[in-house]
Amino acid sequence: MAWQIAGNERALHALRAAVDGGSPAHAYLFLGPEHTGRATAAIRLAQALNCTVDDPPCGECTQCRRIEAGIHSDVVTLTLESDDNVVRKNISESQVDELRGALTLKAYEGRTRVAIINPADAMSESAQNKLLLTLEEPAPSVAIILIATEDEKLLETIRSRCARIDFGLVAADEIKAALIERGATLDNARLLARLSGGRPGWAIDALSDPRVLERRREVLDAARSLVRLPMADRMELAEKLSDAFKRDRDAVLHQLDEWAAWWRDVLLVQSGASDRVANLDHDRELQEDASSHSRAEIAAFLQAIIETRTYLVENVQSRIALDALMLAAP
Ligand SMILES: [Zn+2]
Protein backbone atom coordinates (compact mmCIF):
# COMPACT_ATOMS: atom_id res chain seq x y z
CA MET A 1 0.00 0.00 0.00
CA ALA A 2 1.22 3.45 -0.81
CA TRP A 3 -0.05 6.51 1.01
CA GLN A 4 -3.27 6.50 -1.04
CA ILE A 5 -3.70 10.23 -1.18
CA ALA A 6 -4.98 11.99 -4.29
CA GLY A 7 -2.77 14.86 -5.46
CA ASN A 8 -0.62 16.89 -3.05
CA GLU A 9 2.53 15.20 -4.32
CA ARG A 10 4.85 17.74 -2.76
CA ALA A 11 3.39 17.14 0.71
CA LEU A 12 3.66 13.39 0.29
CA HIS A 13 7.18 13.63 -1.03
CA ALA A 14 8.27 15.56 2.07
CA LEU A 15 6.64 13.03 4.41
CA ARG A 16 8.07 10.04 2.57
CA ALA A 17 11.55 11.57 2.63
CA ALA A 18 11.26 12.17 6.40
CA VAL A 19 10.18 8.58 7.04
CA ASP A 20 12.76 7.04 4.67
CA GLY A 21 15.53 9.22 6.08
CA GLY A 22 14.75 7.91 9.56
CA SER A 23 14.57 11.35 11.16
CA PRO A 24 11.00 12.62 11.10
CA ALA A 25 10.21 15.88 12.90
CA HIS A 26 8.81 15.78 16.44
CA ALA A 27 5.89 17.94 15.39
CA TYR A 28 4.14 18.59 12.11
CA LEU A 29 1.61 21.17 11.01
CA PHE A 30 -0.55 19.87 8.16
CA LEU A 31 -2.05 23.04 6.77
CA GLY A 32 -4.70 23.38 4.06
CA PRO A 33 -8.40 23.30 3.15
CA GLU A 34 -10.71 20.64 4.56
CA HIS A 35 -11.02 17.29 2.78
CA THR A 36 -7.70 17.59 0.97
CA GLY A 37 -6.05 14.55 2.53
CA ARG A 38 -4.58 16.03 5.72
CA ALA A 39 -6.25 13.58 8.13
CA THR A 40 -5.48 10.58 5.92
CA ALA A 41 -1.85 11.69 5.64
CA ALA A 42 -1.69 11.93 9.45
CA ILE A 43 -2.90 8.33 9.76
CA ARG A 44 -0.40 7.20 7.09
CA LEU A 45 2.43 8.96 8.92
CA ALA A 46 1.39 7.31 12.20
CA GLN A 47 1.38 3.96 10.38
CA ALA A 48 4.76 4.61 8.75
CA LEU A 49 6.28 5.42 12.16
CA ASN A 50 5.05 2.11 13.60
CA CYS A 51 4.93 -0.25 10.59
CA THR A 52 7.03 -3.39 10.86
CA VAL A 53 7.93 -3.97 7.20
CA ASP A 54 10.64 -2.49 4.96
CA ASP A 55 8.56 -0.11 2.89
CA PRO A 56 6.23 1.57 5.36
CA PRO A 57 3.33 2.10 5.60
CA CYS A 58 2.40 -1.38 4.32
CA GLY A 59 -1.25 -1.24 5.39
CA GLU A 60 -1.10 -4.99 6.10
CA CYS A 61 0.85 -5.53 9.32
CA THR A 62 -0.87 -5.55 12.72
CA GLN A 63 0.43 -2.06 13.49
CA CYS A 64 -0.91 -0.56 10.26
CA ARG A 65 -4.27 -2.30 10.56
CA ARG A 66 -4.86 -1.31 14.18
CA ILE A 67 -3.95 2.33 13.45
CA GLU A 68 -6.29 2.40 10.43
CA ALA A 69 -9.07 0.98 12.61
CA GLY A 70 -8.45 3.63 15.27
CA ILE A 71 -7.74 1.10 18.03
CA HIS A 72 -3.94 1.37 18.36
CA SER A 73 -3.11 2.33 21.95
CA ASP A 74 -0.18 4.59 20.97
CA VAL A 75 -2.08 6.72 18.47
CA VAL A 76 -4.36 9.31 20.05
CA THR A 77 -6.58 11.83 18.26
CA LEU A 78 -7.96 14.98 19.87
CA THR A 79 -11.08 16.26 18.14
CA LEU A 80 -14.09 18.46 18.82
CA GLU A 81 -16.39 15.47 19.19
CA SER A 82 -16.91 14.20 22.72
CA ASP A 83 -17.80 10.65 23.74
CA ASP A 84 -21.48 11.51 24.00
CA ASN A 85 -21.56 12.85 20.41
CA VAL A 86 -21.65 16.51 21.36
CA VAL A 87 -19.56 18.80 19.15
CA ARG A 88 -17.49 21.10 21.36
CA LYS A 89 -16.68 24.69 20.49
CA ASN A 90 -12.97 24.27 21.02
CA ILE A 91 -10.28 21.84 22.10
CA SER A 92 -9.77 22.62 25.76
CA GLU A 93 -6.85 22.90 28.11
CA SER A 94 -7.99 19.79 29.99
CA GLN A 95 -8.02 17.74 26.77
CA VAL A 96 -4.44 18.84 26.07
CA ASP A 97 -3.47 18.09 29.68
CA GLU A 98 -4.74 14.56 29.34
CA LEU A 99 -2.86 14.17 26.07
CA ARG A 100 0.37 15.44 27.61
CA GLY A 101 0.03 12.81 30.33
CA ALA A 102 -0.35 10.07 27.72
CA LEU A 103 2.69 11.30 25.79
CA THR A 104 5.01 10.93 28.78
CA LEU A 105 4.47 7.16 28.71
CA LYS A 106 6.65 4.95 26.56
CA ALA A 107 5.09 3.55 23.40
CA TYR A 108 3.31 0.41 24.50
CA GLU A 109 2.13 -1.35 21.41
CA GLY A 110 4.35 0.10 18.70
CA ARG A 111 7.54 2.16 18.39
CA THR A 112 6.23 5.71 18.28
CA ARG A 113 3.49 7.50 20.17
CA VAL A 114 1.53 9.72 17.81
CA ALA A 115 -0.88 12.48 18.79
CA ILE A 116 -3.13 13.94 16.09
CA ILE A 117 -4.93 17.20 16.91
CA ASN A 118 -7.72 17.93 14.42
CA PRO A 119 -8.69 20.75 14.07
CA ALA A 120 -5.64 22.21 15.84
CA ASP A 121 -6.82 25.73 15.01
CA ALA A 122 -9.77 25.07 17.35
CA MET A 123 -7.49 24.81 20.40
CA SER A 124 -8.20 27.50 22.97
CA GLU A 125 -5.29 29.78 23.75
CA SER A 126 -4.74 28.14 27.13
CA ALA A 127 -4.77 24.74 25.40
CA GLN A 128 -2.16 25.98 22.97
CA ASN A 129 0.03 27.25 25.79
CA LYS A 130 -0.15 23.83 27.45
CA LEU A 131 0.75 22.09 24.20
CA LEU A 132 3.67 24.44 23.80
CA LEU A 133 5.25 22.98 26.96
CA THR A 134 5.31 19.59 25.25
CA LEU A 135 6.62 21.00 21.97
CA GLU A 136 9.43 22.78 23.81
CA GLU A 137 10.73 19.56 25.32
CA PRO A 138 10.03 16.90 22.74
CA ALA A 139 10.21 13.38 24.13
CA PRO A 140 11.96 10.76 22.00
CA SER A 141 9.65 8.48 20.01
CA VAL A 142 6.77 10.93 20.06
CA ALA A 143 5.25 12.63 17.02
CA ILE A 144 2.62 15.34 17.22
CA ILE A 145 0.58 16.18 14.13
CA LEU A 146 -1.48 19.37 14.08
CA ILE A 147 -4.14 19.57 11.36
CA ALA A 148 -5.33 23.10 10.62
CA THR A 149 -7.06 25.27 8.05
CA GLU A 150 -6.10 28.69 9.39
CA ASP A 151 -2.57 28.91 10.71
CA GLU A 152 -3.08 32.46 12.04
CA LYS A 153 -5.24 30.95 14.78
CA LEU A 154 -2.19 29.13 16.10
CA LEU A 155 0.38 30.84 18.32
CA GLU A 156 3.52 31.79 16.45
CA THR A 157 5.51 29.88 19.08
CA ILE A 158 3.61 26.71 18.15
CA ARG A 159 3.96 27.23 14.42
CA SER A 160 7.68 27.80 14.66
CA ARG A 161 8.17 24.44 16.40
CA CYS A 162 6.37 22.43 13.73
CA ALA A 163 7.54 21.21 10.34
CA ARG A 164 4.92 22.69 8.05
CA ILE A 165 3.40 20.58 5.28
CA ASP A 166 1.04 22.41 2.92
CA PHE A 167 -2.00 20.74 1.39
CA GLY A 168 -3.96 22.33 -1.45
CA LEU A 169 -7.00 21.74 -3.64
CA VAL A 170 -6.56 18.88 -6.09
CA ALA A 171 -7.21 18.88 -9.86
CA ALA A 172 -10.51 17.28 -10.91
CA ASP A 173 -8.71 14.74 -13.13
CA GLU A 174 -6.66 13.44 -10.21
CA ILE A 175 -9.77 13.13 -8.05
CA LYS A 176 -11.55 11.34 -10.89
CA ALA A 177 -8.70 8.83 -11.17
CA ALA A 178 -8.73 8.24 -7.39
CA LEU A 179 -12.48 7.55 -7.50
CA ILE A 180 -12.18 5.12 -10.41
CA GLU A 181 -9.43 3.31 -8.49
CA ARG A 182 -11.97 2.94 -5.67
CA GLY A 183 -14.57 1.39 -7.97
CA ALA A 184 -16.57 4.40 -9.21
CA THR A 185 -18.06 4.33 -12.71
CA LEU A 186 -16.61 6.86 -15.15
CA ASP A 187 -19.75 9.06 -15.09
CA ASN A 188 -20.05 9.06 -11.32
CA ALA A 189 -16.33 9.77 -10.90
CA ARG A 190 -16.61 12.71 -13.30
CA LEU A 191 -19.61 14.15 -11.46
CA LEU A 192 -18.20 13.75 -7.94
CA ALA A 193 -14.81 15.14 -9.00
CA ARG A 194 -16.53 18.28 -10.37
CA LEU A 195 -18.77 18.67 -7.33
CA SER A 196 -15.93 18.21 -4.86
CA GLY A 197 -14.40 21.57 -5.72
CA GLY A 198 -10.89 20.11 -5.46
CA ARG A 199 -11.53 18.19 -2.22
CA PRO A 200 -10.82 14.50 -2.79
CA GLY A 201 -11.90 13.62 0.76
CA TRP A 202 -15.40 14.92 0.08
CA ALA A 203 -15.61 12.99 -3.20
CA ILE A 204 -14.46 9.73 -1.58
CA ASP A 205 -17.00 10.17 1.23
CA ALA A 206 -19.74 10.86 -1.30
CA LEU A 207 -18.81 7.73 -3.23
CA SER A 208 -19.22 5.47 -0.22
CA ASP A 209 -22.03 7.25 1.62
CA PRO A 210 -25.22 8.07 -0.33
CA ARG A 211 -26.32 10.45 2.44
CA VAL A 212 -23.67 12.94 1.27
CA LEU A 213 -25.43 13.36 -2.09
CA GLU A 214 -28.86 13.35 -0.43
CA ARG A 215 -27.82 16.25 1.76
CA ARG A 216 -26.49 18.02 -1.32
CA ARG A 217 -29.86 17.59 -3.02
CA GLU A 218 -31.62 19.17 -0.04
CA VAL A 219 -29.22 22.10 -0.06
CA LEU A 220 -29.64 22.59 -3.81
CA ASP A 221 -33.43 22.47 -3.48
CA ALA A 222 -33.17 25.21 -0.86
CA ALA A 223 -30.85 27.26 -3.08
CA ARG A 224 -33.37 27.08 -5.93
CA SER A 225 -36.60 27.49 -3.99
CA LEU A 226 -35.31 30.50 -2.04
CA VAL A 227 -35.96 32.79 -5.00
CA ARG A 228 -39.59 31.65 -5.22
CA LEU A 229 -40.36 32.23 -1.54
CA PRO A 230 -42.43 35.22 -0.40
CA MET A 231 -40.43 37.68 1.69
CA ALA A 232 -41.97 36.58 5.01
CA ASP A 233 -40.78 33.02 4.42
CA ARG A 234 -37.35 34.21 3.43
CA MET A 235 -37.03 36.07 6.71
CA GLU A 236 -38.08 32.96 8.58
CA LEU A 237 -35.37 31.05 6.70
CA ALA A 238 -32.83 33.72 7.69
CA GLU A 239 -33.80 33.24 11.32
CA LYS A 240 -33.45 29.46 11.04
CA LEU A 241 -30.04 29.74 9.39
CA SER A 242 -28.90 32.22 12.00
CA ASP A 243 -29.88 29.82 14.80
CA ALA A 244 -28.21 26.94 12.97
CA PHE A 245 -25.06 29.05 12.59
CA LYS A 246 -24.82 29.43 16.36
CA ARG A 247 -24.87 25.64 16.75
CA ASP A 248 -22.76 24.59 13.77
CA ARG A 249 -20.87 27.30 11.88
CA ASP A 250 -19.30 25.00 9.33
CA ALA A 251 -22.61 23.47 8.24
CA VAL A 252 -24.07 26.89 7.42
CA LEU A 253 -20.89 28.10 5.69
CA HIS A 254 -20.91 24.92 3.66
CA GLN A 255 -24.54 25.53 2.73
CA LEU A 256 -23.64 29.01 1.46
CA ASP A 257 -20.79 27.49 -0.56
CA GLU A 258 -23.26 25.12 -2.21
CA TRP A 259 -25.65 27.97 -2.95
CA ALA A 260 -22.83 29.98 -4.49
CA ALA A 261 -21.76 26.97 -6.58
CA TRP A 262 -25.31 26.60 -7.89
CA TRP A 263 -25.76 30.23 -8.93
CA ARG A 264 -22.26 30.32 -10.39
CA ASP A 265 -23.31 27.38 -12.57
CA VAL A 266 -26.47 29.23 -13.60
CA LEU A 267 -24.28 32.17 -14.71
CA LEU A 268 -22.06 29.77 -16.68
CA VAL A 269 -25.09 28.36 -18.47
CA GLN A 270 -26.22 31.90 -19.32
CA SER A 271 -22.77 32.62 -20.73
CA GLY A 272 -22.92 29.52 -22.94
CA ALA A 273 -20.27 27.71 -20.87
CA SER A 274 -22.43 24.75 -19.83
CA ASP A 275 -19.46 22.40 -20.20
CA ARG A 276 -17.79 24.02 -17.20
CA VAL A 277 -20.59 23.64 -14.64
CA ALA A 278 -20.01 21.69 -11.41
CA ASN A 279 -23.58 20.42 -11.05
CA LEU A 280 -23.34 18.23 -14.15
CA ASP A 281 -26.32 16.09 -13.14
CA HIS A 282 -28.75 19.03 -12.94
CA ASP A 283 -28.58 20.24 -16.51
CA ARG A 284 -32.34 20.77 -16.88
CA GLU A 285 -32.72 22.69 -13.60
CA LEU A 286 -29.73 24.90 -14.44
CA GLN A 287 -31.29 25.73 -17.83
CA GLU A 288 -34.58 26.51 -16.11
CA ASP A 289 -33.04 28.92 -13.62
CA ALA A 290 -30.87 30.48 -16.33
CA SER A 291 -33.94 31.40 -18.36
CA SER A 292 -36.02 32.66 -15.39
CA HIS A 293 -33.65 35.40 -14.22
CA SER A 294 -31.51 38.10 -15.74
CA ARG A 295 -27.74 37.85 -15.68
CA ALA A 296 -27.51 41.00 -13.57
CA GLU A 297 -29.91 39.63 -10.95
CA ILE A 298 -27.98 36.40 -10.59
CA ALA A 299 -24.58 38.08 -10.55
CA ALA A 300 -25.78 40.40 -7.77
CA PHE A 301 -27.20 37.50 -5.74
CA LEU A 302 -24.02 35.46 -6.16
CA GLN A 303 -22.00 38.43 -4.97
CA ALA A 304 -24.34 38.78 -1.95
CA ILE A 305 -23.87 35.10 -1.03
CA ILE A 306 -20.10 35.46 -1.13
CA GLU A 307 -20.22 38.64 0.95
CA THR A 308 -22.56 37.07 3.51
CA ARG A 309 -20.15 34.19 3.91
CA THR A 310 -17.32 36.64 4.60
CA TYR A 311 -19.44 38.54 7.15
CA LEU A 312 -20.30 35.32 8.97
CA VAL A 313 -16.65 34.25 9.09
CA GLU A 314 -15.77 37.70 10.46
CA ASN A 315 -18.46 37.33 13.14
CA VAL A 316 -20.73 40.12 11.93
CA GLN A 317 -24.15 39.54 13.57
CA SER A 318 -25.40 36.52 11.70
CA ARG A 319 -29.09 37.48 11.68
CA ILE A 320 -28.41 40.89 10.11
CA ALA A 321 -26.12 39.40 7.46
CA LEU A 322 -28.60 36.67 6.55
CA ASP A 323 -31.56 39.07 6.42
CA ALA A 324 -29.60 41.20 3.95
CA LEU A 325 -28.91 38.11 1.85
CA MET A 326 -32.62 37.30 1.66
CA LEU A 327 -33.32 40.84 0.42
CA ALA A 328 -30.67 40.41 -2.28
CA ALA A 329 -32.21 37.23 -3.71
CA PRO A 330 -33.88 37.79 -7.09
ZN1 LIG B 1 2.67 -1.92 8.19
Image (tube, grey):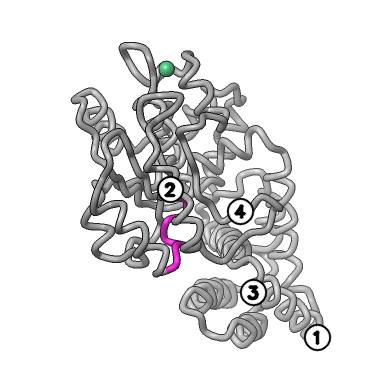
Provide the residue designation for mark 1.
232
Residue 151 location in percent, x, y? 33, 61
Q: Quadrant of residue 133?
A: bottom left
Amino acid bearing label 3:
Lys
What is the CA distance from the residue labelled 2 to the residue labelled 3? 33 Å
Q: Which mark is residue 101?
A: 2
Q: Confirm whether residue 170 shows in the render.
A: yes
Q: How many marks?
A: 4
Residue 246 location in percent, x, y? 64, 74
Answer with left or right where residue 14 lies relative to residue 99.
left
Say if disc 3 is inside 8 Å of ligand 1. no
Between tags 2 and 1, which lies in front? Answer: 2
The region drawn magenta spans 117-124
The residue shown at (53%, 24%) is 66
Provide the residue designation for mark 4.
81
N-term mark: 3 or 4: 4
The residue shown at (50%, 28%) is 67
Is residue 121 inside the magenta stretch? Answer: yes
Answer with left or right where residue 34 lies relative to residue 233.
left
Between tags 3 and 4, which lies in front? Answer: 4
What is the CA distance from the residue labelled 3 to the residue labelled 1? 22 Å
N-term mark: 2 or 4: 4
Residue 91 location in percent, x, y? 50, 60
